[in-house]
Image (cartoon, rainbow, N blue to C red):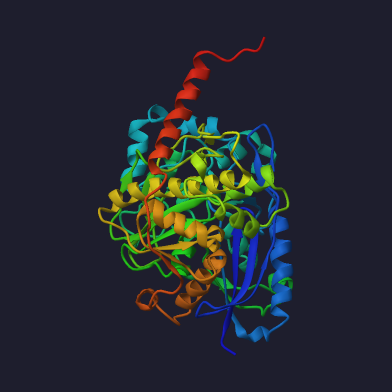
Amino acid sequence: MSDLCLAVDLGTGGPKVALATLEGEIVGVEIHAVATRVDGSGAATQDPEEWWRLIAGASRRLAGSVDPSRVVAIGVTGQYASTVPVDEGGAPVGECLTWLDTRGVAHARSVLGGPVMGYAPLKVASFVRRSAGAPSVSAGDPLGQILYLERERPEVAARTRWYLEPIDYLTGRMTGVATGSAASRLALWLTDNRDLARVGYDERLVRLSGLPAEKLPPLVATGSVVGGLVGAAAEALGLREGTPVVAAVPDLHAAALGARAVAPYRAHAALSTTAWVSCPVPRKKTDVVHSIATVPGLGDGRYLVIDNQETGARALEWCRDLLWPGASYEEMTTLAAGAPPGASGVRVGPWLAGERSPVEDKGLRAVVAGLGVATGRADVVRAVMEGVAANLAWLFSHVERFVGRPLEPVSLVGGGAESTLWCQMVADATGRRVVRTPSPRVAQLRGVAHLCAIALGRTTLAELAARPDEGEAFEPVARTGKSDLAALYRLERGWRRARRRAPPRLG
């Protein structure tokens, strides 16, 4: 009969909603899917009202199985670098532009574009010096999204009071208060992160961004309580009015908490829809060339390393839909286990949606090589999994250079980590001991429970860090795939250059 929290993880694929103890035990969970609407214009949108309906329904069903008085806090995590336009009351006035939406690229370039890696040097220097990063000129983050709405969708912009991240939209819907934090708004790069005690936007960076300052929500401290659950939201969620709602954090932060990788240099890696490698570090730093930086961390005066690979475990979903529609992931990984290591010479560069780290290349596309008449479906599935592991190892080597030390062990989170075979592939590709976080698919939900416990004063980051490791460990057996991946990258870039010089003709 311990106290519970409602934990929400709004991923790109849809929301996960759970009741969890403040110690991080998941006692009930629902997982729902949402569609991303895409078209040839670069649009990639979702419906915020659909998120709310799914989350509210799941909350009512979960809360109906317990005494609602046991739910003492609510926390939210999920996708970031996306934009929800809302009115004064917090209701959406348009669709969410997700991090996959590229319609604002021309507007982002008009503000920050230039000759040095696509940026105007003096402008980007101000961003990097203060915040450690800069808005992307390749689109896919709030700068381009907001400018697109302001300049091309005046009917939406005129009705917009606040431009919110999806996770902040949910906390605003729950509390009636529009807020963000240095963590939730990290993709704006508009806070001066040289001093993490500061809470607020940097005026110079806001001016340089060209964004309407009056439509950016006020910032609160990361991990603080935003407010109490208001009546309409309490009724929708089936919870008590006044239940504390904690400031939302991105899935990067929730994953670190869920893996308990919160001590300095304790690494975690994600095999989710996307993939990343991170750890807490004591200092602000930027690697512009490899798209690795630091962002405000968990409210303890430290930073988190941030980077991102656009395709992680999503590659296996693509492979399934292409080769074996309707198969379960367990069937896919069982099939892959029947192929030999090295996938009988088949190699895959899993760049289905371009790449951010360790190279920012939106035009990069996946490569499959080594197919032959004897190639079987098992070889292709295994090659996809090995390619994702090799891609993560490619990033991992740059992150180790970035932090200046080996990172071991590595806690692995995300749905892909449910595969024992994939965990071993990551250990082999990185050459590092990998620890699979218990129930890795819901690691972020467990992280939200820890976030709520910290906000309520029930535990501390130091206490979390002191707990012993949980989960199965995987030791590296043989290094595989990294050199092959580099060759595939060179091949794909060479093919693109050749196509630009001499477009192929038929007939």
Q: Quadrant of residue 477?
A: bottom left
Q: Decide which of 46, 273 is in the foreground and name it.
A: 273
54 sits to left or right of 336 = right
Q: In this view of the protein, can residue 83 be seen by the observer? A: no
Tell me where residue 385 appears, x and y as whole percent: 53, 49
- The answer to whether 46 is drawn above or below residue 7 in the figure is above
Q: Measuring 74% from the left and 62% from the top, which residue is drawn there?
A: 53
Is 261 or 86 nearer to us in this picture? 261
- Image position, residue 204 (x, y; %): 38, 44
Left or right: 384 in relation to 232: left
Q: Nearer the viewer, residue 504 or 193?
A: 504
State the image coordinates of residue 346 (x, y, percent, origin top left). 52, 39
Task: Farthest residue to the bottom: give it.
Answer: 1
Image spot of residue 20 (x, y percent): 58, 77
Query: Residue at coordinates 44% horizontally, 45% vertically from top-left?
Result: 391
Indicate the quadrant containing the N terminus: top left, top right, bottom left or bottom right: bottom right
Kindly give the residue lying farthest to the top in the view shown.
Answer: 507
> Which quadrant, please, contains the C terminus?
top right
